[in-house]
Image: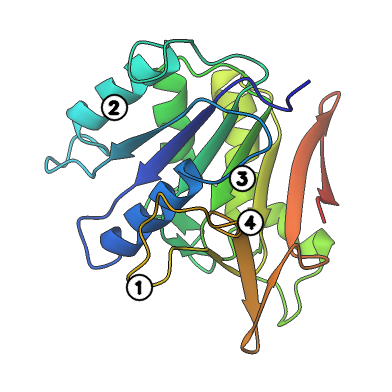
Amino acid sequence: MANYDRQLIIVLLTDGAQDAPTLAQAKALNQKTRGETLDSEIVTIRPCAQPACTFAAAGVEELRLAVAGRLRVSRPITASTRVYLVGTGNWQHRTLSGCTPEQVAAVLGEVKMMAVKVISIVADSLGRSGSALVQPELAASIESFAALFHRRLKENWQIQTVVQARVMQVTVVLPPPGVKSDQAMPALGQKVTTVEGETRHHRPNSKVKFLWEGEAQRAEWAY
């Protein structure tokens, strides 16, 4: 049995220079080769031009349709779905593409996102807290963007799910220059971390998982 019934990749843009590489990584995630076919689609959300809102209405509406199974994948989000959040991470300021944990949780709540199987954040170091040392400790992740986002989902929107994020710089493997993205590439879409110039897939103690045990939030290494 497959781990997930479908996949949704939500891309948070900034209307800045980082948007092109962010979109390229989302596309690679969407085209990743898997043992079993997994319905997957990408929704992009841009910042709102008006001070009264956080995200542009067109992207929010597209996300609403995707959650309901009325966009490119004709099945709604379920408890067996995987969701990716892709954007630019700032672990010191605890933001994803300039947005706070409360703002990102709110857009998911507003479009009626249910408690999916996992929300995986693909952005640099958002499992790391602003007080973490050079080598992040698991205990120090509890005040990270990912931990706060995990709590806000439950506290503000009653969405009780698992959230995962890296404590290091993370990138998605893209096609080499001149190679079409639809060609067979075993590593395409893999998430890799870089430490002191060394890039590695599934690096130990690099990905933290936040989950609930009753009313208590708990952190553990995903790997």
Q: Residue at x 56, y 48 (%)?
A: 121
Are the residues tagged 3 and 4 within 8 Å (C-beta)? yes
Q: Amino acid at mark 1?
A: Pro
Depth check, mark 2 against mark 1: the one in front is: 1
Q: Secondary structure at mark 1?
A: loop
Label placed on residue 144: 4
Q: Amino acid at mark 3?
A: Leu
- If you read the primary sequence from the N terminus, does the residue marked by circle 3 or circle 1 appear first? 3
Label placed on residue 148: 3
Label placed on residue 60: 2
Q: Which residue is mark 1?
A: 177
Q: CA distance from mark 3 to mark 1?
A: 38 Å
Are the residues tagged 2 and 3 within 8 Å (C-beta)? no
Residue 42 position, x and y percent, is 38, 35
Of 145 and 155, the residue lying toward us: 145
- If you read the primary sequence from the N terminus, does the residue marked by circle 2 or circle 3 appear first? 2
Q: CA distance from mark 2 to mark 1?
A: 33 Å
Q: Is residue 151 above or below residue 90?
A: above
